[in-house]
Amino acid sequence: MQIEMVFLLYVLVGFVAQMIDGALGMAYGVSSNTFLLGMGIPPAAASASVHMAEVVTTGISGFSHWKLGNVDWKLVRRLLIPGVIGGVVGAYILTALDGDVIKPYIAAYLLVMGIIIIYKAFTMTPKKKMDEYHGPRVSWLGLVGGFCDAIGGGGWGPVVTSTLVARGKHPRMTIGSVNFSEFFVTLAESITFVIALSFTQYWQVILGLLVGGAIAAPIAARLSQKLPVKTLMIFVGLLIIGLSIRTIVLAMQ
């Protein structure tokens, strides 16, 4: 009975994390990885478990966003390959490095980005045209986002989505494009972890996160389409600020 309850807890974590990630374009890995680390699972194994579950959940989420017309293919082309490269490098390094070392620095950056997003939400006028240009800097952002995602057990969405939205990209299209690209980044990271690690004892964690995330993915994708742009930006900003402050506080203890 105890094993069943623990499994259902993993399912619940996966569901809530995917609802956040699919609707706001971020924080599946950050929220679920925080829980796993709190349970005493080693950082590399926790990140590997999250990303293996995400292979399915991000696939469903990306497909849902594509069907709903939330994908900007120009943005995807800029993000996908650099994101995969950064993810593979980060996953490989994490097998020999404690990812918690880099978390406070990422959190400080995200805290600033969260404040900028909320500021833009209140100052942006309906007549203001969204920035639809995706230059070389977006590719560098994808590289950094993929690296941070693997090292910290999550971070693709917070790093990439928050930065793009803060630059004036359309929140709904950004969320859909980042989610679609995330499937390929997560798949590459998972393959790297499988090659470098042995963590068959964590199958229950992986399956629980996978089931909960798979149920939530199509619901969250539709939710992102219905939310007003301003509301979505405020949610994104508050989420980033809250998670960043928590990470910084824990790092200082």
Image (spheres, rainbow, N blue to C red):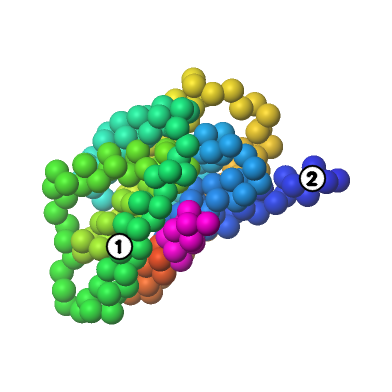
* Vertical relation: 42 (above or below) 232: above
In terms of sequence position, does the residue under pointer 1 or pointer 2 come before the other?
2
The residue lying toward the viewer, choosing from 101 and 49, is 101
Q: In the image, which is nearer the foreground, mark 1 or mark 2?
A: 1
Tally of numbered discs: 2
User: How many neighbours does mark 1 have within 10 angstroms: few (below 14), some (14-19), or many (20 or more)?
Assistant: many
Name the residue type under label 2: Glu
Asked which quadrant contains residue 124, the reply is bottom left
* Vertical relation: 52 (above or below) 111: above
* Vertical relation: 171 (above or below) 141: below
> Which residue is the extreme one toward the front?
253
What's the mark number on residue 4?
A: 2
Real-space Cα separation, disc 1 to disc 2, in angstroms: 40 Å
Q: Main secondary structure of the magenta part?
A: helix
Is residue 179 shown in magenta?
Answer: no
* Vertical relation: 59 (above or below) 34: above
> Which residue is the extreme one toward the top?
195
Q: Which residues are magenta?
A: 242-253
Please indicate whether residue 197 sits to the left or right of residue 132 in the image: right
What's the mark number on residue 113?
A: 1
- SS type, badge 2: helix
* x 47%, y 37%: residue: 98
Could you tell me residue 221's position as x and y percent?
45, 57
What's the mark number on residue 100?
A: none
User: How many neighbours does mark 2 have within 10 angstroms: few (below 14), some (14-19), or many (20 or more)?
Assistant: few
Please indicate whether residue 163 sits to the left or right of residue 22 in the image: left
Name the residue type under label 1: Met
* x 65%, y 33%: residue: 202
| Residue 93 can be seen, yes or no | yes
Asked which quadrant contains residue 163, the reply is bottom left
